[in-house]
Structures are given as C-alpha cells and as structure tokens.
Image (tube, rainbow, N blue to C red):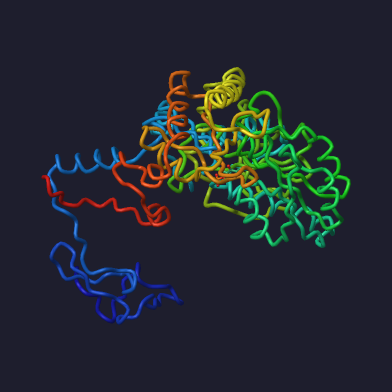
Amino acid sequence: MSDPSENQVRYDQARFVEDGHYEPLLAEKDLTRVEIDGDDAESPLPNDLTREALEFPDLSEPELARHYVRLSQMIYGIDTGPYPLGSCTMKYNPKFTEDVAALPSGAVHPDRSERSTQGTLELMYRLQDYLGRIGGMDAVTLQPPAGAAGEFVGIRVAAAYHDHNGESHRDEVIIPESAHGTNFATAALGGYDVVSLPSDEGGRVDLEALEAALSENTAALMLTNPNTLGLFERDIAEIAEMVHDVGGLLYYDGANLNALLGRARPGDMGFDVMHYNVHKTFATPHGGGGPGAGPVGVVDELAPFLPSPRVREADDAESDADETTYELFDPEHTIGKVHGFQGNWLVLVKTFAYIARLGDEGLTDASAKAVLNANYLASQIDYEVPYGPFHHEFVASAGEQDAADVAKRMLDFGVHPPTTKWPEIVPEALMTEPTEIESKATLDRLAAAFNAVTTESDETLESAPERTTARRIDQTTAARNPRLAWQALEDE
Ligand SMILES: *Cc1c(COP(=O)(O)O)cnc(C)c1O
C-alpha cells in the first residue's frame, strides 16, 4: 500500500466538505503504522483502537480440534445433563430449529427492500401473531434482545402511555420482594421509584399490603405468575382490578410462562403488558450473554407506543396482488427503536420453528409435563419444600446447610444444581425447575444427587466440588474473563 500524498486524500478516509473538496477524517498523527503481511502500511484506525501485533498460535489441525473438544468437555450444558436452574427454564434446544435458522434463505441483509423480503416479514408477522395468541395480547414487538430488555421496553411503553394521558405524575412501580432482580433494575432504569411488596404467609401477593401500596402515583405493578415460588397467584383477577382502579398498569414478567402454556393467558388474567423469554419458554439458546430475544406483548391501548418497526399486512386495496403482502411500520406514538433493524432475527426464526413444530397440543403438553416433573422431583427429595402447591418449579430449603455449598457438591454427582439463595423468603433456597424435557430416569438421578448431599458433613460440602475440571472458581470473573485461548499443555 502506498502512502497517500498530501494532495491525494483517499476518499474512504475523508469527508466531503464542498464542491469536490474533501478533508481527511483523521490527522496524520492519529494514524498508527502497522505491519500487514510484512508490509509497513498505514492503518485507517486511530492509535487507541489498534494494537501492535496479533499473536495467533501456530497450531496443527489435531491440536486445534483437541482445544475445542477439551473446552466443550470442561463445561456443563443442557446437552450434557439435567440443568434444573429454577426460573431460568433451561430447556433442551432442539437441533431442528438450528437447521431451520441455518437455511440459506434466512441469511437476509437487514437493509434489503420489503418487496424482496416478504418471507422474512411474513415469518415475523406470524410470530407476532403466535405470541399474541399465546399470551392473550393484542399487539407484539419482536425487537427487544432479552427478557430484561423486554421489561425495559414494557416499562417505557407504560410510561409513554401515562405521559400521553397527562398522567406523568405517576412515579412508582410496585414489585414483590420475591421478584427477579431485573424487575427492580428495570423500574429504576425506567426512572421510577420502586415500592417493594411483602408476600403473605402463603408466599403470594399480600392483598392488604398491595392496597396500602397502591395510589394515584402507581404507574404499574410487575408480577410473575406463577410467582418465583412456583405458586399461582390465585387472586390475580382481584389484583388486576385493584391496580386498574387506581389507573395503574399490570406488567407480566413472562419468565414463568412455561407453567401456563396452552392453559392460561396473562391477557385473560388482566395483564396489560408482558415480555416473553423465548430462550426460556420456546427453547432457543440460553445464557452466555445471548443473543436472545424478549418480545413484548401489549393490549390494544398500549399498541401505539410499541417500539418501531413492527410488521403488518399491507393494505393491498389499490394493487391487484392476490397474495397478502407485509410491510414494516412505525406505531403512531412509538417510543422509538430499541434494537438494530428487526431484532435478533435468527433467534426469532428458531422461536417460530419451535412453536410451529409443537403446535397447540405440543405446547399444552409441555406445560403439563413441566408441572408434573417438578412435582415428581419434589416428592422424591429429602429437603423440605415449604410452599405449595407449586407448578413448574419449587423452592426447597437446604435448612442448616449452606445452599451454595449444596450446589457445589451436586456438581460432583454429574448434575447441574438448582438456583440458590433466591427467593430469600425461603431460607437457603434451592429453586428447582427440571422442565418438561427430563425423563423419569433422569429425575430419579437428580433426586439421588439431592439426597446424597442432604447427609454430608460441612467439611465435604465446603471443599466441593472435587470431581469437576475446575473447583471453586471466582464466579464473577469466571463469567467475565473466561480463559478460552489455546495454551500449550504439559502433557502434550
Ligand atoms: C430470567 C428472568 C428474567 C430476565 O430475563 P433475561 O431474558 O434473562 O434477561 C426476568 N424475570 C425472571 C423471573 C426471570 O427468571
């Protein structure tokens, strides 16, 4: 590459100023000199974005294959064994959905015209429709990239609705103490004061406490149902009425939708806005930071505020096309864009494939088995389960033991442990959700792992795990700074 002389500014590094004049985007001093294939060349990147040299290991194919296979053997995933991480609904990701997402026709540039991407738009339209029908919601956006992002959209939509109605004074969001941490974060990030709601003795919403918390300042109540103890909020109709009576909105955290699929719908219970965790309920890949999707559904009154773009059937009255066509549109009072282009498209393809393959019957069957499996597992373990009757998950108590140690020890039995220490209403909580995918044999193996740990000494528990590739790791940095690079091993 030759250096551009002072008079010859390269167009890709310059900005058009006026009539045939360009000025360089970056001053000479900002450019760094890097070696590319042994040539001294000028980089168009500023110094602080470049690095001196890339040290790629020079490896043979077998070394490379071993590196990745070893990494895959060091981790535990849903393809390795049971993963009853409560609230997270760790379902097996069926491989056919990957096949569907890998079809060449799925690789669509997001800037292509609507006319040339009718199939893409139709899939999105039909998915909006499926999700709306599953949740009992009138309108759906597919944009948010995760459940937490969906919560944020839902709360921003609620805020826009209140503002539109001249009710900007509403500055409180009510959240049960036992709710997921993202609910509190969402409300705070959305600019609201959080009003924390205690549970009653049975582990459900305390109606008296709710009455006391509700006021003309209430913007919304955020609930998940069944709640984080797996208990159905039996008073949901009354709760909805109470919230609506003060002019508030009812938000449904969809993380526990797997308990209700095909049987009950948040919309019918009086919820106004909800998110769907497609990686929980609809078996798309989960964890590791995504990509995921957290579509949001709303009732008619809130539809004009949804993020843009959404997909609708085009008005074909003037054209003579006899097929339905689809188009993107911006809802009238949209809160704007919350994600690039049309959201995490290929995750949405997997969601669509999963729902379409299972159909009404399959989805209804999934929730039945999810509830059956949770109840069977709970009946087989020796730890106490203080609250019930529960649905798709239950919260056992490790009693005198430390729940985190119990979890570490369970790893030694080749199973993934439950979620620990949350919700805090159960001391040393073991929040367990086997999901519908497990067989009786696997549930028995899981129960055996729980029961083996119940009688173990503190000493054993505190030094666990001893049979895993890594032992007590720093839980925060292990997820933030994983060491995945190839390293020469002494035994090779
Ligand atoms: C998982 C979960 C969320 C957050 O969803 P993400 O998709 O992980 O962002 C919110 N609420 C509950 C109850 C959850 O279990």
Q: Taking the image as drawn, is residue 199 in sight? A: yes
In the image, taking residue 159 as reference, residue 479 lies left or right, namely left
- Residue at point 82% right, 53% down? 213
- Residue at point 26% right, 68% down? 51
Q: Is residue 98 above or below residue 52?
A: above
Which of 277 and 209 lies nearest the eye of the viewer? 209
- Residue at point 36% right, 57% down? 481
In the image, taking residue 143 as reference, residue 474 lies left or right, namely left
Q: Position of residue 54 (x, y in %)?
A: 21, 62
In the image, taking residue 241 as reference, residue 145 lies left or right, namely left
Q: Taking the image as drawn, is residue 316 in sight? A: no
Q: Quadrant of residue 39?
A: bottom left
Q: Is residue 357 above or below residue 178?
A: above
Which of 475 and 313 lies nearest the eye of the viewer? 475
Q: Quadrant of the C terminus?
A: top left
Q: Is residue 263 above or below residue 210?
A: above
Q: Position of residue 16 (x, y in %)?
A: 43, 73
Q: Position of residue 347 (x, y in %)?
A: 48, 38
Q: Quadrant of the N terminus?
A: bottom left
